[in-house]
Amino acid sequence: MLVTPVSYTLAVGAAEGLTPLNAFDNALLAAGIGNVNLVRVSSILPPGATHVEALQIPPGSLVPTAYCTCTSAVPGERITAAVAVGLSRDSFGVIMEYEGTGKREEAEAEVARMLEAAFERRNMKLHQVRIRGVDHQVKTLGSVVAAAVLWY
């Protein structure tokens, strides 16, 4: 059986790179999660998980992460990504991510709407919301990432 994470943080980053993969890797480094192995998870935050500003994760660790990313090679294009965590008062939480073109504020508003819809569908009351977003104007080849990083 897998251990359930007990803490989480929200991480965002933006960067340019030589190739799309390099740009994504550089965005992960900018977000502080470039030296771990992300294991993509869906949208549920474990009950009782606590928010921390920064996680100290050993390099190479397998890290459960809900994330989104956008990469573009269109100079001048503004790309964005945002992640939101919604908490109920006495149950689990929900994570939503959004990526696309536009401004950070637009992405953050969209994940907030998505979070409200997710709670409504589950017939749960949304008690607390945390949102982080990032945007980047592409110079040559840019990437953005927004992540809810879970840890033990």
Image (spheres, grey):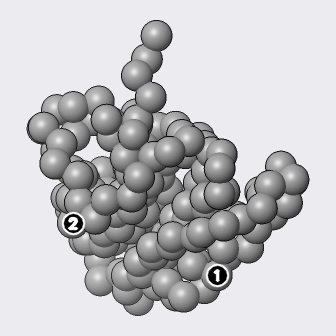
Q: Amino acid at mark 1?
A: Ala
* Residue at 41% across, 52% down: 50
Q: Amino acid at mark 2?
A: Ala
Q: Secondary structure at mark 1?
A: helix
The residue closer to the viewer here, 147 or 139, is: 147
- Up the image or down, 75 lies above or below 32; here it is below
Q: Quadrant of residue 126?
A: bottom right
Q: Position of residue 123 (x, y in %)?
A: 87, 53
Q: Position of residue 114 (x, y in %)?
A: 72, 66
Q: Left or right of 145: which side holds 122?
A: right
Q: Left or right of 91: which side holds 41?
A: left
Is residue 74 something that shows in the picture?
no
Q: Secondary structure at mark 2?
A: helix
- Up the image or down, 44 lies above or below 104; here it is above
Count residues near mark 1 (Cα–Cα under 10 Å), then give few for <14, some for 14-19, many for 20+: some
Q: Quadrant of residue 117?
A: bottom right
Please name the residue that numbered disc 2 is placed on: 30
